Amino acid sequence: MPDWEQIAHIQSDVSGWLEWSPNGKYILLEIREDLASVIDPEDAGIIMTVPHSWFSATWSPNSQYITTASDKQTRQVFEVATGLKILDTPHDNEMFPITWRSNSQYVLTGSREGTIRVIEIATGEEVQQINHQASSYYGASWSPDGQYIATYTSSEVKITEFSP
């Protein structure tokens, strides 16, 4: 069995999870139940810290943003370089994690009430809405080329063309 060399050590009270950025430069780390940080593993430096009451967080495909899914029925997008919150998307019901389009310019947000919104990151504007009649919406996903959106409930899958 090979010997593993430790290349970095980050001293922290980790309470939950961690996730590498897609470009491999940063780690998103839950420090406490109400606080998370983006850390540069090369020097163990903290790039940004955000307060949270979320149950999930994800990176944008280009590693420039992180999204949070709150138990308070909001989704937030933070810019990693500045630490600024650039988007806050409320829903009327339990929500699901944000799904990024591959170019990192749009996100899908959705909730159990059956409304799925496409939000443009640069403007914060809703550019498309998909509605399910059922109140049992479970999730959404972009096609790899970003041309289509698949949404599903307990009884159906919808494929919708994306038209900003």
Image (cartoon, rainbow, N blue to C red):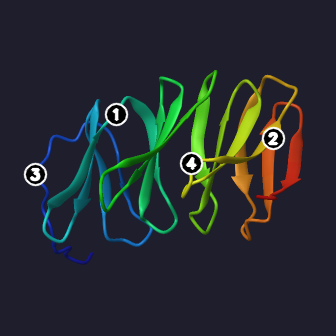
Question: In the image, residue 34 lies at what x, y percent?
Answer: 28, 30
Instruction: Say the numbered circle drawn on residue 162.
Output: none
Of the two numbered discs 4 and 2 in the rendering, the one whose residue sits closer to the viewer: 4
Of the two numbered discs 2 and 1 in the rendering, the one whose residue sits closer to the viewer: 2
Report the quarter where the C terminus lies.
Answer: bottom right
Q: Quadrant of residue 117?
A: top right
Which residue sits at x=32%, y=71%?
25
Disc 3/disc 2 C-alpha distance (Å):
44 Å
Report the quarter where the N terminus lies.
Answer: bottom left
Question: In the image, residue 43 lies at what x, y percent?
Answer: 13, 68
Residue 132 placement, left or right of 96: right
Which residue sits at x=88%, y=27%?
133
Residue on which disc 1 sits: 52
Asked whether the beta carbons under mark 3 and mark 1 sit within 8 Å of each other, the answer is no
Instruction: Say the numbered circle drawn on residue 124.
Output: 4
Residue on which disc 3 sits: 11
- Mark 2 lies on a secondary structure that is strand
Disc 4/disc 2 C-alpha distance (Å):
17 Å
Type of amino acid at the residue the image marks with label 4: Gly
* Frontmost residue, 3 versus 29: 29
Asked whether the beta carbons under mark 4 and mark 2 sit within 8 Å of each other, the answer is no
Which residue sits at x=19%, y=76%?
3
Disc 3/disc 1 C-alpha distance (Å):
21 Å
- Mark 1 lies on a secondary structure that is loop
Instruction: Say the numbered circle drawn on residue 130.
Output: 2
